[in-house]
Amino acid sequence: MDILKKPLVQRSLLLAAVYAAMAVTVANFGTSGNAYAILESSALVGIVAAGLAVNMMAGELDLSVGSVAACAGLVAVMMSGHGVAVAVACAVVPAVIYGIAQGYAIARLQISSLVFTLGTFIGMRGLAYVISDERTLTLALSDLGISMALRERMLLIFSPSSLVMVAVLLLAGVLLRYTRAGREIFAIGGARRESRAAGVPQTRPLVVSFAVSAGLAALAGALASLKGGSATPGGYETVLLAAVTAALIGGVSLYGGRGSMIGVLIGVLTLQVLLSGLQLTGAPGWAANLATGLILLAFLGVDLVNGESPVAEALRRRSIRSRARA
């Protein structure tokens, strides 16, 4: 029964419990059509959450992802006449460069990422209004086939967008587990001072984490805007909160150094299963917010029982530092 004590197993069981409760109480919830809809709604949040999770594992938080997604969506719609690949590339490449510059600046200036990215969040949102000339951009009639193609069911209950989400989570997991940059991200996130003393580079993992965060936010914004057929400079304002919530539900620590992409996927699916069920019942908007808060508290409660809550982590680190000084 020791397997039941593993956090990922517990989170999987909670996801299964939420799904089972919705399938029993909500009509048509367990259909393949609704499963497709859940995965479709998960794509935007899942891709952004994957990037934010990498950032959070490094002990940082990029507040500008919503603004980056909005700018990328506008660029993708503007470039849609050249095809999906070109449109997405034109949106993602500048975002990666922006993320590299942002990570380098934070590392060299040794400034809080919350303060720095709050400024870039505002600046990038302003840039979105400049790019769009303060108006909503839509696909040309000749390019509407792009929107239809991105919505098409390709493989059972998967669409191109949801398949991209799965691929992104898989590649991000490989980056973290099997590459030197991934090990450095965990090292500086788990113990910044100790990793510096051990000679772990501090700039490179921050640059990589912010580049991944910005690049995936741009990818999500570009795909969502092309799929929806339009982009607005004020779009994706709530994606940051949803992505952070999904990452926390999935076991990613705000203190850094802990988390996995499997956990992020569980978090995203749990959140979207809950929201889908409430939507099918016709529940008001406040009910979704209340239920999201309760499910987040339930998962944090699991961490508290397992001694993996942020409070427990802070106490452990304080104890380690006290012993080191002694």
Image (cartoon, helix red, strand yellow):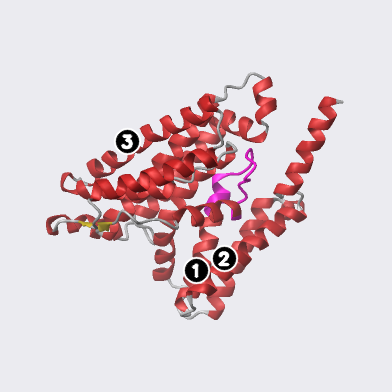
- Residue displayed at 68% across by 32% down: 191
- Residue displayed at 44% across by 45% down: 64
- Crowding near the residue tagged with mark 3, few <14, some 14–19, many ≥20 C-alpha atoms within 10 Å: some
- Crowding near the residue tagged with mark 1, few <14, some 14–19, many ≥20 C-alpha atoms within 10 Å: many
Q: Report the disc number at residue 94.
A: 3
Outermost top residue: 199
- Residue displayed at 53% across by 40% down: 115
Looking at the rendering, the stretch of residues picked out in magenta corresponds to 249-265
**Three-letter code, disc 2:** Thr
Where is residue 35 drawn, in percent x and y? 44, 66
Report whether residue 76 is seen. Answer: no
Residues at marks 1 and 2 touching, judged by CB atoms closer than 8 Å: yes
Q: Is residue 200 above or below residue 261?
A: above
Q: Nearer the viewer, mark 1 or mark 3?
A: 3
Secondary structure of the magenta portion, mostly?
A: loop
- The quarter of the image holding the N terminus is bottom right
Q: Earlier in the sequence, mark 2 or mark 3?
A: 3
Where is residue 184 drawn, in percent x and y? 58, 28
Report whether residue 64 is seen. Answer: yes
Q: Report the disc number at residue 292.
A: 2
Locate residue 261: give its quadrant.
top right
**Three-letter code, disc 3:** Pro
Residue 76 lies left or right of residue 199; in this view the side is left
Q: Earlier in the sequence, mark 1 or mark 3?
A: 3
291 drawn magenta: no
Where is residue 151 drawn, in percent x and y? 30, 60
- Residue at image mark 1: 275
- Residue displayed at 47% across by 29% down: 105
- The quarter of the image holding the C terminus is top right
In the image, 203 versus 159, the foreground residue is: 203
Q: CA distance from mark 2 to mark 3?
A: 33 Å
Residue 95 lies left or right of residue 239; in this view the side is left
